[in-house]
Amino acid sequence: MDNKKKEMLAMLTKLADDFQAQIPERITKITNAWNDVNDDYNTEKQTNLLRLAHSLAGTSATFGFTDISTAAKALEVILQDINSLDVLKEKHHIICEHIDQLTIASQTN
């Protein structure tokens, strides 16, 4: 392997390691955003929560954290269906389960 390939591999490895170190903080942000949505539902807060889940799903997939990506994507899909406080209340338990699954997935990586 030539030096350029080694340098590129080292950079990618560092990016993956940096991302892995950020996973607990990202899940905490998702949990906090979920709590914010529950405390005072509005579309801005719901959009923020959806964005956080989407970002974690995509970045996790990019770096090969399949379990986290799958759990975050499942959460994202559920959140996309929320368009009112009534729907939020209806899906509350399911969303909590998905956030729990996300936490579990992060502990196995």
Image (tube, helix red, strand yellow):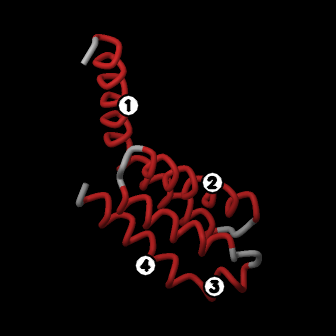
Residue lying at the far bottom of the rendered structure? 90
Q: Amino acid at mark 3?
A: Lys
18 relative to 42 in the view: left or right = left
Q: Earlier in the sequence, mark 4 or mark 3?
A: 3
Distance of label 2 from label 1 (alpha carbons): 21 Å
- Taking the spot 63% from the left edge, 85% from the top edge, the residue there is 89
- Taking the spot 30% from the left edge, 67% from the top edge, the residue there is 104
The part of the image, by quadrant, that contains residue 53 is bottom right
Distance of label 1 from label 3 (alpha carbons): 38 Å
Q: Amino acid at mark 1?
A: Leu
- How far from the left and from the top, in percent, is residue 81? 69, 76
Label 2, on which residue? 51
- Between label 2 and label 3, give the one nearer the viewer: 2
- How far from the left and from the top, in percent, is residue 95? 52, 76
Label 4, on which residue? 97
Q: Earlier in the sequence, mark 2 or mark 3?
A: 2
Q: Quadrant of the C terminus?
A: bottom left
Q: Amino acid at mark 2?
A: Arg
Distance of label 4 from label 2 (alpha carbons): 19 Å
Q: Which mark is residue 89?
A: 3
94 relative to 68 in the view: left or right = right
- Vertical relation: 18 (above or below) 98: above
Distance of label 4 from label 3 (alpha carbons): 14 Å
Q: Earlier in the sequence, mark 1 or mark 3?
A: 1
Label 1, on which residue? 15
